[in-house]
Amino acid sequence: MPSHAYDDLLVHLARTTSLSAGEAARVVADVLAYFAEPAEDFVRRRHAELKAGGLTNDQIFERVAAELPQRRVAPPELSLRQLRRIVYG
């Protein structure tokens, strides 16, 4: 029985990159966690990142609204008002 659900992927990454088996396992875990992030957490994280980058809220919410449908499992479409409510309550 495999010790990890993605053993074949880990072996492939270790074989085709300079990553060790442990590094490949961490990369796969990080990618899976990224794609498992709930939409609300994504909105809050991206808002903070873009705000730190100097964008205005109008620019931020437009960008986040455009990014959400590109997620691996896209959440339902959210209005700019709904995005603001996620960040500010």
Image: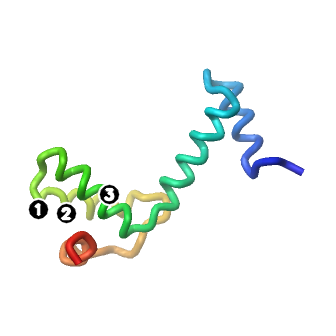
SS of the residue under disc 3: helix
Q: Secondary structure at mark 2?
A: helix
Disc number placed over residue 58 in the picture, else none: 1
Q: Is residue 51 left or right of residue 75?
A: left
Please tell me which residue is depicted at 19% across the width and 63% down the height of the picture.
61
Give the class, few, some or many, for how many residues have Cα within 10 Å of label 1's Cα (few <14, many ≥20): few
Name the residue: 12% across, 50% down.
55
Using the image, tell me which numbered label, if any, was put on residue 14: none
**Rendered location of residue 52, percent (x, y):** 18, 47
**Considering the image in quadrants, where does the C terminus appear?**
bottom left
Q: Label 2 is placed on what type of residue?
A: Phe
Q: Distance between the Cα atoms at labels 2 and 3?
A: 12 Å
Instruction: Identify which residue is drawn at 17% across, 52% down.
Output: 51
| Front residue (pair 62, 39) | 39
x and y percentages locating residue 21 in the rendered image: 70, 31
Mark 2 highlights which residue? 61
Q: Which residue is mark 3?
A: 45
Left/right placement of residue 60 relative to residue 43 reads: left
Image vertical order of residue 89 relative to residue 52, above or below: below
